[in-house]
Image (tube, rainbow, N blue to C red):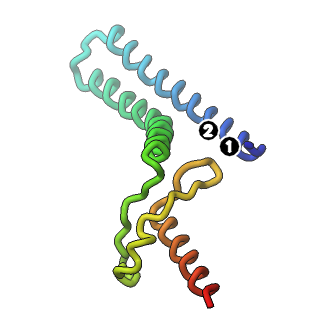
Amino acid sequence: MTTTIELQMKREESLLNLICFIAAAGFIAFVVYNFFAAGSFISTDGLFFTVVPLVLALSFLAVPAMDIISRRRGTRVIEAGNVQPRVAAGRGAPPLQAGAAQFASAPALKDAKGRAMPPDVNRMVAEMNKQKAEGSKP
């Protein structure tokens, strides 16, 4: 069941994607117009009016592209059985011991949007659950 906050965020994301697509289409239309309207296309001004709008269009297309890539990665994780790769201990953290290997690849947790949580969060939750289980045993 989706909440009103999730629906509002989904609407905001779709509106942002729409605005980005419109801005990118405008820049690409400007490049096409410049190609046909410019007297000398291969000149300093012609190259400037081609490269700069194309770079701006690509930057506007990066926002929806990242959304699409994150959705595809999420579906791949779900199809693969939610298996997370092993996580090495970071700087300042104690190294993973032989007994710690059991929670290095904890089952994937989901955030409010249904995306997989980062592996380090999964590892920390698994460590906390292990400590709770050890503390409850007599």
99 shown above or below 74:
below
83 shown above or below 89:
above
Q: Which residue does the image show at 40% across and 82% down from the upper left?
A: 93
Q: Position of residue 82 (x, y in %)?
A: 47, 52
Label drawn at residue 13: 2
Q: Position of residue 25 (x, y in %)?
A: 47, 22
Q: Position of residue 71 (x, y in %)?
A: 50, 40
**61 or 122: nearer the viewer:** 122
Q: Which residue does the image show at 39% across and 80% down from the upper left?
A: 99
Q: Kindly identify which residue carries mark 1.
A: 9
Type of amino acid at the residue the image marks with label 2: Glu
- The reply to whether discs 2 and 1 touch (Cβ–Cβ < 8 Å) is yes
42 shown above or below 23:
above
Type of amino acid at the residue the image marks with label 1: Met
93 horizontally vs 1: left or right: left
**92 or 85: nearer the viewer:** 85
Q: Quarter-wise, where is residue 22 in the image?
A: top right
Helix, strand or loop status at disc 1: helix
| Residue placed furthest toward the bottom | 138
Q: Mark 2 packing: few (<14 Cα in 10 Å), some, or many (20+)?
A: some
